[in-house]
Amino acid sequence: MKLRVKLLLLFLALLVISFGIYMYKRYSLEKRYVAVTEKKYKNDILRVGIIGDSWATGTSLDTIMTDEFLRRGVKTEIISFGEPEAKTKDIYDNLYANPGTPYSSSEILHHNLDYCVILAGTSDASGEMGAKFYAYYCSLIIDDLLKDKIEPVFVTMPEFGFKEAEDSLDVFKKVRNEVGALLIDNGSTGTLDDYRKQINEVLKDTHLRDSAIVVPFNLVCDNYQKHKILYRNSGHLSTKGKQKMGKIIVQYILDKERKSQLQQPPQGSSGNVKVANSAPPANLKGAGS
C-alpha cells in the first residue's frame, strides 16, 4: 500500500514538473538571434515577402497581392511562408531556422526583398500568450527585418472570433490557458485591444513605428460579428476578406514607394520606377490600430 502511494506521489510530482517545464518553454521570452546584414542590390521588380501563422499559408494572399500590384502596373515577385497555429515566437524562430526544416522562412532574410508583410496575432490571442509576449516578438521580427534592410509591413492584431475560438478549445487547452493567464496577468484573459495597445506602446517606445509600415487591421474589419462575410470561420478570413486585406496592404506599400520616390533628388533616372497608378488611401476609413 505504501509503495502504491509513493508511486502515485512520484507520478504526480513528475506530472507537475513536466507541466512546469512545458509552461516555461511556452511563455518564456527567449534571447534574440544575431541578425547579419546582407549586401543589397537594386531590384528590377518589387520584391515582397509574407511571413506569419496560418494567415500566411497557401498561395491565396500572395496571388491576390500579385494580381493587385499588376492591376496597378507594378510587376512583383512575392514569396510567402506561414505555419498553422504559429505564435509570434514561432514566426520569429522560423526566420532563423535552417533551410529545409519544416516552416523555415530563412529565405526571407536572403532574398533581397524590399518589403516583408507580417501576419500574426490570432494564435497568440487564442493561445492566451499575453500582450507582452506578442509585442516582444513582433518587435524582434520588425527590428531584425530592418537590420536586413527589409521594410516591415506590420498588420496589427486582427479582429476575429476571439470568444468562439476560446470556446472551441478542448479541456486541456482551456486549463492551460487559465493557468497561463493566472501567471501572466493575475487570471485576466485580456482582450484583443490589450494586444493592440501593448504593441503600439512598444513600437512607439522603440521608435520602430517610424521605420515600419503599420497597416491597421480595422481597415479590413472592425467588428467580427457584423462582418462575418469576410471570414471563413472564427479564426480565418474568407476569400473576400483576403482580397480586401490584400488590396489595403498593396495600397500602403505603393504609397510608401511613391513617397520614397518623391523624396529622391531629381538627378537623372537611377533605377526602375516601380510605382504606377497609385492613389492615396484617403478612402480607407478608421486609421487607428
Image (cartoon, rainbow, N blue to C red):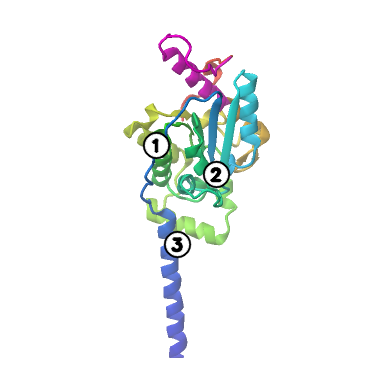
Asked whether residue 196 is in view, the answer is: yes
Residue where numbered disc 1 is placed: 37
Residue where numbered disc 2 is placed: 53
Give the residue type at disc 1.
Thr
Give the residue type at disc 2.
Asp
The residue positioned 36% from the left and 37% from the top of the image is 202
Q: Are marks 2 and 3 in contact (CB under 8 Å)?
A: no
Q: Position of residue 12 (x, y in %)?
A: 45, 75
Foreground: disc 3 or disc 1: 1
Decide which of tag 1 and tag 2 comes sooner along the chain.
1
The residue positioned 57% from the left and 55% from the top of the image is 169
* Residue 65 forms part of the magenta stretch: no
Residue where numbered disc 3 is placed: 22
Distance in Å between CA atoms under marks 1 and 2: 25 Å
Distance in Å between CA atoms under marks 3 and 1: 34 Å
Which of the 4 image quarters holds residue 36?
A: top left
Give the residue type at disc 3.
Tyr
Q: Which residues are magenta?
A: 248-276
